[in-house]
């Protein structure tokens, strides 16, 4: 202790000398030790590589490589039916996460193993190396794998198949309850993805399209564009064809638009008469499929296609159904929005559509009345009796617009000169020409037997869902569908539509009843019911124009009188 206290610097210098010596020894010895270790490792590797491998595909793969090719996504096994559906579709594109099964038959000894597609899009086969399969179709990928393996091993019987499919995200946007990205398995069709997104919206304010759903794809510039494929869930439900409910690919998204307001209609000798959302490109055969086909016990051969012409008149077109079903493109006409197809059959039926527990066809018998039919179909709580209607097939050869002088007068006005209100009246009145009878279903359900009419073969009763709104159109500031309010009269609804515009004929207001389709004169104090339409006609001339004409006539007459007076004075002087 006395020595250390007396010479503290000496011991510290000795400690530093020893430490520096150890460090110098370590740096000098490390390269020789590392070189020796590397020689031992290389020698061991050479010994392993010189040993013949009885199984060319069983060489171990370093752990790092296995981690690299293992896809960072969930992989699920698929069933044979789903796998077959993918193969038949021919649309499946291989990508990271797919797993291939390789089966080697060597002298009746079978070896099977699985190889996943790595994140780089390649398969890594032992003793073969990487095989790029990303963005190839399933057939192309199988060929690429076969080629790579047979180049390395010529005499092996090898078969390759897709064992498990990857999972990838797809965006489902638009009129669905939960828009956003959903995880997709390769065998899932569009309808399953829409279900994952909460399903189509179908309520009073919004309704998602079931026939015009778009598939968008991201191009090289990062822009979304339409593909040639379209999702039609109605036709898929009827036919089960995958073309209407396709598989989705990486980089695609589903866009569900708002359902179109225009429809196509079918009635008569079909399984499910009714109205269906129109899709561009629809043909007569598609409408028959939507109606679930012709009645099997007596297949009809003829039909009438009703089409609204430019002059506002419904014109029938004869359809030869035997040619349509045979695939004749000339007979299988392309439809327009609003077309109505009546299939002529031998058996007599009546039909109920809409908000009833048992929609569809009912056998017709003589003496069947409307109320009895409604009792058989049973109205649902959502049924709108106010807006219900009865459609009766029309003898188009005998019916003319001359039966309605007002409509005849409106159709005499050139289309370019018609006002919005006149166009609305033409539309409403031509709907009546399609066979809509003026039945008051509210009075009928209240016990008024006057409206409990006898039915005829082919009659169609339509019971829509209750829509508590009133349509205001014509010469108003902002035509619109306005939520129904029992406290409002005609004047109140017109005020909510912005009031009259400068060309309104305020004393010639018309109410088109929602349940009967009848047009009646109204005032600002008239009562309105749900489903009614208020039409405000338009003046032929602007307000004040008559006053200006009168003023000009008076001025002209004054000028003439002055001229006459001057002539008289001149004659007197002479």
Image (spheres, grey):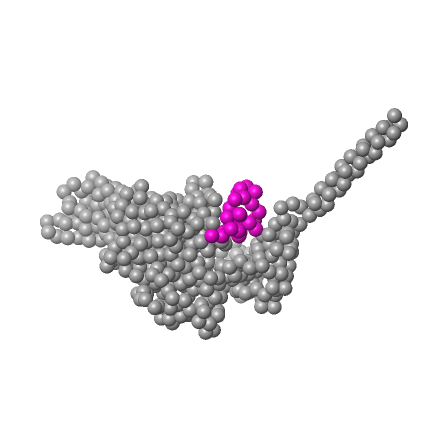
Task: Name the residue located 27 percent from the left edge and 53 percent from the top edge.
Answer: 300
Task: Give how far across and how far down residue 553 sits, in percent.
Answer: 74, 40
- Of all residues, the one furthest to the bottom in this rendering is 447
Secondary structure mainly formed by the magenta segment: helix
**Residue 75 visible from this viewpoint:** no
Q: Which of these two is toward me, 419 or 378?
A: 419
Question: Does 228 appear above or below 200?
Answer: above
In magenta segment, residue 456? no
* Residue 551 shown left or right of residue 360 in the figure: right
State the extent of the magenta-drawn residues as a range. Answer: 403-427
Question: Does 367 appear above or below 256?
Answer: below
Question: Does 91 appear above or below 201?
Answer: above
**Figure disc tally:** 0
Name the quarter where the C terminus is drawn.
Answer: top right
* Residue 426 shown left or right of residue 319 in the figure: right
* Residue 537 shown left or right of residue 360 in the figure: right
- Of all residues, the one furthest to the top in this rendering is 574
Task: Name the residue located 52 percent from the left edge and 54 percent from the top edge.
Answer: 13
In magenta segment, residue 415? yes
**Residue 521 visible from this viewpoint:** yes
Task: Give how far across and how far down residue 444 sits, in percent.
Answer: 45, 70
Task: Name the residue located 51 percent from the left edge and 59 percent from the top edge.
Answer: 518
Q: Which of these two is toward me, 47 or 536?
A: 536
- Of all residues, the one furthest to the right in this rendering is 573
Task: Give how far across and how far down residue 99 sits, in percent.
Answer: 28, 52
* Residue 59 shown left or right of residue 98 in the figure: left
Task: Give how far across and how far down residue 339 sits, in percent.
Answer: 40, 50
Q: Which of these two is toward me, 41 or 486?
A: 486
Task: Name the residue located 35 percent from the left edge and 56 percent from the top edge.
Answer: 267
């Amino acid at each position: 202790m006395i020595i250390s206290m007396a010479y503290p610097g000496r011991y510290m210098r000795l400690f530093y000398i020893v430490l520096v010596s150890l460090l110098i020894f370590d740096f000098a010895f490390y390269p020789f030790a590392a070189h020796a270790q590397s020689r031992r490792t290389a020698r061991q590797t050479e010994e392993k590589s010189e040993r013949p491998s009885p199984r060319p595909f069983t060489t171990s793969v370093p752990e790092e490589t296995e981690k690299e090719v293992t896809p960072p996504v969930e992989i699920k096994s698929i069933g044979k039916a789903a796998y077959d559906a993918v193969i038949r579709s021919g649309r499946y594109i291989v990508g990271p996460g797919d797993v291939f099964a390789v089966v080697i038959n060597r002298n009746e000894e079978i070896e099977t193993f699985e190889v996943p597609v790595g994140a780089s899009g390649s398969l890594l086969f032992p003793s073969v190396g990487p095989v790029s399969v990303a963005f190839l179709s399933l057939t192309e990928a199988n060929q690429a794998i076969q080629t790579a393996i047979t180049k390395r091993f010529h005499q092996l019987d090898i078969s390759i198949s897709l064992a498990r499919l990857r999972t990838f995200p797809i965006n489902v946007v638009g009129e669905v309850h939960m828009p956003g990205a959903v995880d997709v398995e390769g065998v899932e069709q569009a309808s399953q993805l829409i279900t994952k997104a909460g399903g189509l919206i179908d309520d009073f304010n919004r309704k998602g399209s079931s026939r015009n759903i778009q598939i968008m794809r991201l191009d090289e510039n990062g822009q979304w564009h339409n593909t040639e494929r379209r999702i039609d869930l109605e036709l898929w439900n009827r036919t089960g064809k995958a073309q209407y409910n396709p598989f989705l690919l990486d980089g695609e998204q589903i866009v569900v638009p708002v359902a179109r307001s225009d429809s196509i209609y079918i009635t008569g000798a079909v399984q499910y008469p009714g109205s269906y959302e129109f899709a561009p490109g629809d043909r007569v055969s598609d409408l028959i499929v939507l109606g679930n086909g012709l009645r099997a016990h007596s297949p009809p051969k003829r039909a009438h296609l009703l089409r609204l012409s430019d002059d506002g008149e419904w014109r029938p077109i004869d359809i030869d159904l035997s040619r349509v079903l045979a695939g004749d493109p000339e007979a299988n006409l392309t439809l327009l929005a609003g077309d109505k197809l009546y299939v002529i059959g031998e058996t007599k039926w009546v039909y109920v559509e809409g908000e009833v527990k048992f929609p569809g066809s009912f056998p017709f018998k003589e003496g069947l009345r409307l109320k009895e039919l409604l009792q058989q179909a049973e109205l649902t709580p959502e049924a709108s009796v106010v807006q219900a209607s009865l459609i009766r097939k029309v003898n188009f050869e005998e019916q003319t617009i001359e039966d309605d002088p007002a409509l005849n007068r409106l159709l005499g006005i050139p289309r370019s000169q018609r006002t919005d209100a006149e166009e609305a009246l033409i539309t409403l009145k031509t709907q009546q020409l399609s066979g809509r009878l003026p039945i008051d279903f509210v009075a009928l359900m209240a016990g008024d037997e006057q409206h409990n009419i006898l039915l005829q073969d082919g009659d169609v009763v339509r019971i829509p869902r209750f829509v508590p709104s009133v349509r205001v159109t014509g010469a108003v500031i902002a035509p619109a569908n306005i939520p129904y309010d029992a406290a409002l009269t005609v004047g109140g609804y017109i005020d909510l539509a912005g009031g009259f515009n400068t060309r309104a004929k305020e004393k010639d207001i018309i109410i088109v009843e929602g349940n009967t389709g009848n047009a009646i004169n109204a005032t600002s104090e008239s009562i309105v019911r749900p489903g009614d339409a208020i039409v405000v006609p338009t003046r032929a001339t602007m307000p004040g124009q008559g006053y200006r004409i009168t003023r000009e006539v008076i001025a002209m007459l004054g000028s003439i009188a002055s001229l006459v007076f001057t002539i008289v004075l001149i004659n007197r002087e002479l």
